Amino acid sequence: MTRILSMLIGVFFAVSLLSPLSGQRTAEGAKWAHDRKHVVMGGEWHDPVTWKVVEPVEKPKSTGSTARDVSRRFREALETKKLKEDVVKRAFRRGGREHLTIPRAAEGSPGMHSSRDLRTAVVVADGDLWAWHDGKGVHRVTSGLDDARRFELSQDGSAVSYIKGYDLFMTRLRDGKTHRISDDGGEALFYGELDWVYQEEVYGRGNFKATWWSPTGAHIAYIRTDESGVDTFMVVDHRPQALRIEDLKYPKAGTTNPRATLWIARPKDGKKVAVDLSRYDKADEILIVRVGWTPEADACMFKVQNREQTWLDLVFADPDSGKTRVVIHEQSDDSWVNVLSMPRWLEDGTFIWESERTGFKHYYRYDRTGKLKATITSGDWNARRIQTLNEDQGWMVVTGTTPDYAIGSHAYLATLDGKKLVRLTKGMGDHRASVNHDATMVLDTFQHFTDPGQQWLRRTDGTDVRKIYGKDLPEDVEPPLWKQVQCRDGEWVDVLVTKPADLDPEKKYPVWISTYSGPDSPTIRDRYLGAGRPAWYVGLNVNVRSASGRGMKYTKACYRQFGVQELKDIEDAIDWLCAEFPWADKDRVGITGWSYGGFMAAFALTHSKKFKCGIAGAGVYGWDLYDTIYTERYMATPQNNPEGYLASSVVAAAKNLHGELLILHGMIDDNVHAQNCFQFVGALQKANKQNFQMMVYPGYRHGVGGRHIGRLRARFMKENL
């Protein structure tokens, strides 16, 4: 259940146009010129201090090739080899995977791959590997790559790697020498490509890549994954007469996990070594969660976690011997440790490291031995990403939150020695900041719920230079109400209220909550939303504390018991809304969500009496039914946390269903299996509950779209809210 699942909320809500959260962005009025000293607006160059129009400075012309140039020259060179025109077209047209989330799915043409310096490129044409070298023309390297998967060219352009059948190969371009790196791959043994759970929960949905070429091309690191003993789950498509069955290795929480090891091979002679992982106890059941290389390619660096992900190591491995040393160790005693970005290397050999060790994500500077050189950012706010890095001048621009405001985005200027940290942006809103060449001035472009957009030019010491533009709120737009609501325990959560069109304060209106509420996945963001408003109900969105974006200090509120604290926060928001505004009807409150949000909707109707109805889509209704890596990160294993799994179970609480519930699910969902839906429905039937409906969608996986689901939702709301 990767973060990408939060996007499914938008897909799900879009089909019925019921969500008020359809943010718009304002167009940028001015930007820094390519010299980063002048401002360009309306095609004219301005001095940023006087705003006088100045002559543009000519942009230096690029003397290097582009990927488009390489493609054109490669095609022209292939024409001399008498290849058919349609064969060449297919070779350069990259194809997609047959199934985005199914391991080892067939892939189309890999398209053109080029080296880092664009002096070498390769394509596969009718199964033949062709290479182009700048100034040397093309040559056919080898054949037999018709069904190759995970095709990749080394960064220096000296060799390619690919998978045929179950095994990993690499071929040198200069002489076509091919090394078979593995020869025992099989249904349960993966080389150089990921299994289902690793791609879904560790490396990102649809990303099955498990090979990493070193910058010099002298080595390639790859993961070997052993799925022996991992349970096979059958995803059944009931539409064909004979049924279509996908046998998917899918480890459910508490069951046998795939075992990953890291290996390094070299194309020079095909020699391979296993990276030494002997420092880790077998009971740790380690996960290899990131892999990369140092800039000099003298070490393969990777991240290791224990099965329940309460610690993380950054490890360096010697590429020829496989010997390892731990450089940084992160550990938490009261939560999990997130997998953050890999080290960002600086020219002096130090690197920038991301950590949430203080309860908030911040940036630190380390040397290669693991010695802390500087704490670059700090405080009770959450850094999000590095926007600009200027190592020569020793500073970077970071986006993030503030201690009391997490739904927007601010920008900070931080020096790499940790001695200076200053906020560049002012006021509420979603800020995009851009600094000049020496970080003395900043262009701040932003918008807010009540503001369609502004842009300011100011000095980085906070002095305003000029307002470049400001947009007025249209007369026909009533922005949503944003409020920080205090909960029963004194903590606060962000709440957004969208009033119905033509609200009559003397009437009572139902309340409709759209939610996701998964760990660190907020649904409220401070952006101008335009004129969209629901016609007949009050829209309510809540960033529960564990999905607030405020930092791990708050996200870990869901640790070891999903749904419990999230529901309390939603209930407190409902109580505030209905007490604050008499036109909000506390007896007609509904809730909907998809994936984690589907779980939350079903959890709300089985653990609270505040809801009149709900729509639950593709939810995990028993967390023992979901995969190991996601579930155990937050919940530990069922063996180590039986109370938490019981407290978080919708299936176990089916007998307590209160209000009308519509359950939706895709029949061939390979992520949250339809098994969840059927176990929940079975428990409802066993409890003789009559207050639910179910609709399944044959042929759909984890996302469901189309007119039918939108109309069904709309009708259900009208009839039950």
Image (cartoon, rainbow, N blue to C red):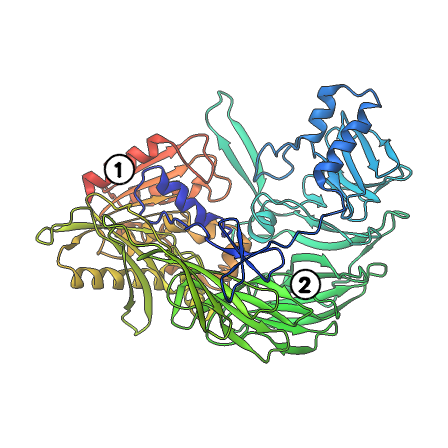
Q: Secondary structure at mark 1?
A: helix
What is the quadrant of residue 214 in the picture? bottom right
- At label 2, counting other C-alpha atoms closer than 10 Å, the crowd grade (few under 14, some 14-19, many 20 or more) is few
Work out whether 169 lies above or below 542: above
The one nearer the camera, 588 or 647, is 588
Camera sees residue 336: no
| Location of residue 703 in the rendering, given as x and y in whole percent from the top left corner | 44, 39
The one nearer the camera, 181 or 407, is 407
Report the amino acid beneath label 1. Answer: Ala
Work out whether 454 lies above or below 70: below
Q: Residue furthest bottom?
A: 419
| Location of residue 537 in the rendering, given as x and y in whole percent from the top left corner | 20, 47
Rounded to the nearest whole Å, what is the CA distance between mark 1 and mark 2? Answer: 52 Å
Q: Which residue is mark 2?
A: 282
The one nearer the camera, 327 or 84, is 84
Camera sees residue 276: yes
Work out whether 696 lies above or below 626: above
Q: Residue furthest left?
A: 506
Q: Residue at x 46, y 71 (%)?
A: 381
Q: How many marks?
A: 2
Q: Which residue is mark 1?
A: 714
Report the amino acid beneath label 2. Answer: Lys
